[in-house]
Amino acid sequence: MTTSRVHITPHMHWDREWYFTTEESRILLVNNMEEIMTRLENDPDYKYYVLDGQTAVLEDYFAIKPENKERVRELVQAGKLIVGPWYSQTDTMQVSGESIVRNMLYGLRDCLALGEPMKIGYLPDSFSMSSQLPAIYNGFGINRAMFWRGCSERHGTDKTEFLWQSNDGSEVSAQVLPLGYAIGKYLPQDEEGLRARLNKYFPVLEKPSVTKDILLPNGHDQMPIQKDIFEVMDKLREIYPDKEFKMSRFEEVFERIEAERDQLDTIKGEFNDGKYMRVHRTISSTRMDIKLIHAEVENKIVNILEPLASIAWTLGFEYHHGLIEKMWKESMKNHAHDSIGCCCSDKVHAEILNRYILADDMATNLINFYKRKIVDHMPAREGCDKLALFNLSPYAREEVVNTTITIRAEQFNLFDENGTPVEYFIQDQR
């Protein structure tokens, strides 16, 4: 009698930076990608490989190996190399909801240029889960979520499969990785080594599972493929004859979960409980210089630049998608959990800060460009200069505005667009 089905999914978790720099990890990436693609292309039994749910890793790879883009595309379209849906493995508590939406938006768009994305909200290592993720996922047609950190029975269920809802009723099927994403890394071939590890893991995985379909992710941080995985699986079948071992995609596990929908608990709220795994709450206050420029750049793009770009577009000027995407992606590289958590080396923090400085400079200059275009489009009054004030709030405002103007005249008058005088006071002049 089969007591459980063990799904072995080859993958790697890819921190672009942490205690190592992006360029250090890129060297490993070039080597790993060649091993992965060669195995997928030449071994029909090695059916799947999950590329950590993010496309930033491919962007880093194509910057060095553009000639391999077609190889990647063929493997994605064959359903063997599994990509997306994110651009980067975002934190969900330190960044705004709009940043999470854009991360998914750009990630899915990058995926669709290659083939079909993985339609799972896959965040195996982000340090907590925002309560609004089901709503965001549903907005992109995603009805499944998989994560590790932040969950315990104190949320209302002791099961690892459940229905997770946002406050608006948006819902996903959730699969928690109770022991993390790396429990199947470097599996040994010998019985003693396998039993030493898995005799501890299997009870923890099986007891809270509704379906008895348990995950044994075969991968780790920056880990190359395990070349002898099929020999290991043969040994596992010999040691544990009561279990079924198969190489699977995550989607197969969710199909089993959804078949048991009536048996699943329904949970609402965020997952930020450190009972069984670290959620690193203190990252909220580390490197406040980076946290502050992060908030400034987010606000500048979302609440100033993009409304101005939209106004300019209605007047016939170009909406610069490419420039805005560039500054978003510079920021979203920093939104990865280790990066925005600022739990990296000083050298990496310098790189993070420089990316924000770049994004801020781009945003500031594009804001000024659009302001000039909009003002130039406004009708001129003969003999007068223009003084334009921009209200980017979604409602009309009446208030006193403090501003600085530079003119040659000692006296001046202000008129609105109808020629009505506007009252003003000079607080200081030089």
Image (spheres, grey):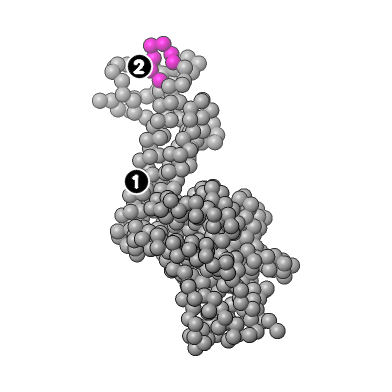
* Residue 28 horizontal side relative to residue 394, left or right: left
Majority secondary structure in the magenta region: loop
Q: Which residue is at a point 32% across and 62% down the rendered structure image?
A: 345
Residue 383 among magenta residues:
yes
In the structure shown, which secondary structural element does the residue marked by tag 2 occupy? loop
Quadrant of the rendered image containing residue 117:
bottom right
N-terminal of the two: label 2 or label 1?
Answer: 1
Q: Residue furthest front?
A: 42
Closer to us: 89 or 49: 49
Residue 429 among magenta residues:
no
Query: Circle 1: is it few (<14), some (14-19), or many (20+) Cα within 10 Å?
Result: some
Give, as a three-letter code, the residue at label 2. Phe
In the structure shown, which secondary structural element does the residue marked by tag 1 occupy? helix
Closer to us: 112 or 45: 45
Q: The C terminus appears in which quarter of the rendering? A: top left
Q: Position of residue 224 (x, y in %)?
A: 44, 68
Q: Position of residue 178 (x, y in %)?
A: 55, 73
Residue under label 2: 412
Closer to us: 395 or 54: 54
Q: Determine the CA span between mark 2 and mark 1.
A: 38 Å
Query: Circle 2: is it few (<14), some (14-19), or many (20+) Cα within 10 Å?
Result: few
Give residue 196's mark.
Answer: none
Give, as a three-letter code, the residue at label 1. Ile
Residue under label 1: 357
Q: The N terminus appears in which quarter of the rendering? A: bottom right
Q: Looking at the picture, does residue 411 appear above or below residue 252?
A: above
Q: Which residue is at a point 59% across and 85% down the rendered structure image?
A: 238
* Residue 255 horizontal side relative to residue 126, left or right: right
Q: Residue furthest bottom?
A: 192
Q: Which residues are magenta?
A: 380-386
Q: Position of residue 281 (x, y in %)?
A: 44, 65
Q: Position of residue 308 (x, y in %)?
A: 47, 33
